[in-house]
Amino acid sequence: MKIAYLLGSLNRGGTETLLLDVFRNAEKNCLDAIGIYRKKGDLEYEFIESGVKMYRLSVGKNLIAYLIQLRKLLIESETTVAHAQQPIDALYARLACIGTKIKIILTLHGYDFTTKKFSSFILRFIIKRTNVNIFVSEAQQIHYQQKYRLKSKKQKVVYNGVSFDKLNNLTLDMTLNQPMSNLRDELSISSNTLLLGTVGNFVPGRNQMIICRFLKGLKAENVNFHLVFVGGRDKKSPHLYDDCVDFCKQNDLKKNVSFLGSRNDVPDILKQLDAFVYATDHDTFGLAVVEAMAVGIPVFVNDWEVMTEITENGKYVTLYKSNDKVDLLQQFMVFLQDKEAYKDKAREAACFVSEKYSIEKHIENLKHVYSQ
């Protein structure tokens, strides 16, 4: 059974990080796969070196030529399943595979709350014309199934997975073949400063501004802290990043925060944090939250339904009320009074996610869907 994974660009993001981990673990988990992508990106080299054969097919101005190339590649590679990560790629695959027995599967990695008119049309068209739709959480599946009146037998939930080998092994600087520098040294932060962090690009669906407002309150409490924002500025929504930077400048938080942009050493950064803080409006899974849980640090995340689901109703993290900086601050101040109890909870969380959200479990569940 040959699986062809269809991707758009290979820029750094949650979907791309997940697929890269799948590719790196494909061979040892008996997953026969190829990757087909339309655009280059920051992670192109990593994908090419992942162990899975990669093919770049650009759509360009001639869609018919692209579909012919895609059809030829899928047939010649003896593809059984074309697994798209975006509705547009599922549509391309459906058109390219007319008259073949190739199954079309689409994973919905996000919600449709901010989908533009043309993209919404494509989604509505293709979501009922795939063989299977995969969702990354129960809450997300319920939303789509109810809104688009989908047949339940064609809808599956496959939780995202984390490569624990990646988290357990020290990331090396690719240019020097040395361990990455200590984050406190890099930022000139003393050992007695509370080092906090959050991970995620500044895109619609995230809510880094709530974290900024929380930090203002934390400083008013005279807490010695420094928080790192790890994540890139989105070209389509640059204001989400710019507003956070401006807020920190205006509220005298410049010495308390660092905007690190996109990084390739996220596992190392997570291991060095004293606590992880996250805020979302409508994430579908929360890969960064699971990775933070996996390294065994206290995690604070808002009670968005997906976060409640993946953390067992907050059993393994601290949930605060969504969009409520005051509640987050109050919960955090309790943590400061009894850090050891929270560290014990974090160690339990690491065991929990290692069983439920491993990349091996993710691939096993995907293979089960492919074979049905």
Image: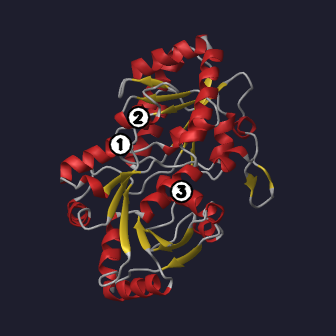
Closer to the chain start, of discs 1 and 3, is 1
- Identity of the amino acid at label 1? Glu
Q: Where is residue 134 in the image (x, y as percent from the top left)?
A: 37, 56
Q: Which residue lies furthest to the top in this view?
A: 337
Residue at image position (62%, 60%) is 29
SS of the residue at dot 1? helix
The residue identified by callout 1 is 138
SS of the residue at dot 2? helix
> Compared to 262, does 329 lie above or below?
above
Q: Position of residue 299 (x, y in %)?
A: 54, 29
Q: Distance between the residues labelled 1 and 3?
A: 18 Å
Number of numbered discs on residues: 3
Q: Which of marks 3 and 2 is in front?
A: 3
Q: Position of residue 30 (x, y in %)?
A: 60, 65
The residue identified by callout 3 is 363
The residue identified by callout 2 is 309
- Identity of the amino acid at label 3? Ile
Question: Is 320 left or right of 363, judged from the image as shown?
Answer: left
Q: Where is residue 21 in the image (x, y as percent from the top left)?
A: 59, 57
> Compared to 286, does 83 lie above or below?
below
Q: Distance between the residues labelled 2 and 1?
A: 8 Å
Give neighbour class at mark 1: few <14, some 14-19, many 20+ (Cα, 10 Å): some
